[in-house]
Image (cartoon, grey):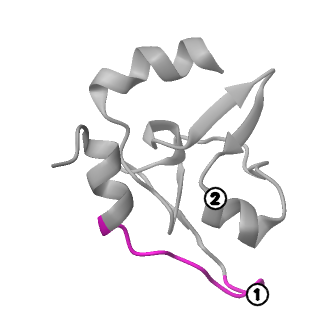
Amino acid sequence: MKSNWKEVFAEETIKLEFPKEHEPFIMSKEGFSCSVCEYFKEKNKVYHCRNPYFIKWQGSDKLDIEDPSKWCSDWFEPKHSNDIHDSIESY
């Protein structure tokens, strides 16, 4: 039996890989957005996505968006509330 949700999720997640010409971002007026994603990081007012499939598609982890609360991508995964404090402190 897996010890935590990340181990279970890692085995059950569909790998999302897209060609470079794919447009993965959508405007999100409410609810889902980069700012509430498991992979979202902000450092020195620069936004980053740590999802390995996004990085493979983009070529880097940099998000080229102005407001992360208004955008969402195909790689969105909701941030789990017990991880929010740890992710902020660890980046």
Q: Secondary structure at mark 2?
A: helix
Q: Residue at x 40, y 52 (%)?
A: 77
Span highlighted in magenta in the image: 12-22
Residue 24 x, y percent position in the rendering:
60, 73
Q: Which marked residue is nearer to the observer: mark 2 or mark 1?
A: 2
Q: Residue at x 45, y 57 (%)?
A: 76
Q: Nearest the camera: 61 or 66?
A: 61
Position of residue 12 relative to residue 9, above or below, is below
Q: Is residue 17 magenta?
A: yes
Q: Nearest the camera: 48 or 12?
A: 12
The residue at which mark 1 appears reads as 21
Q: Is residue 91 magenta?
A: no
> Could you say which quadrant of the image residue 41 lies in?
top right
The three-letter code of the residue at mark 2 reads Pro
View extreme (left): residue: 1
Q: Is residue 88 left or right of residue 84?
A: right
Residue 39 x, y percent position in the rendering:
54, 44
View extreme (front): residue: 1
Q: Residue at x 26, y 54 (%)?
A: 8
Which of pointers 2 and 1 lies earlier in the amino acid sequence? 1
Residue 40 x, y percent position in the rendering:
57, 40
Q: Residue at x 63, y 84 (%)?
A: 18
State if disc 1 and disc 2 touch (CB < 8 Å).
no
Position of residue 38 relative to residue 86, above or below, is below
Say few, some or many: other residues with alpha carbon within 10 Å of mark 1 (under 14 / 14 to 19 / 20 or more).
few
Q: Is residue 4 left or right of residue 77?
A: left
Q: Looking at the magenta stretch, what is its main secondary structure?
A: loop
Q: Secondary structure at mark 1?
A: loop
Q: Nearest the camera: 74 or 66?
A: 74
Q: Is residue 14 left or right of residue 65?
A: left
Position of residue 66 relative to residue 51, above or below, is above
Q: Which disc, if any, is residue 52?
A: 2
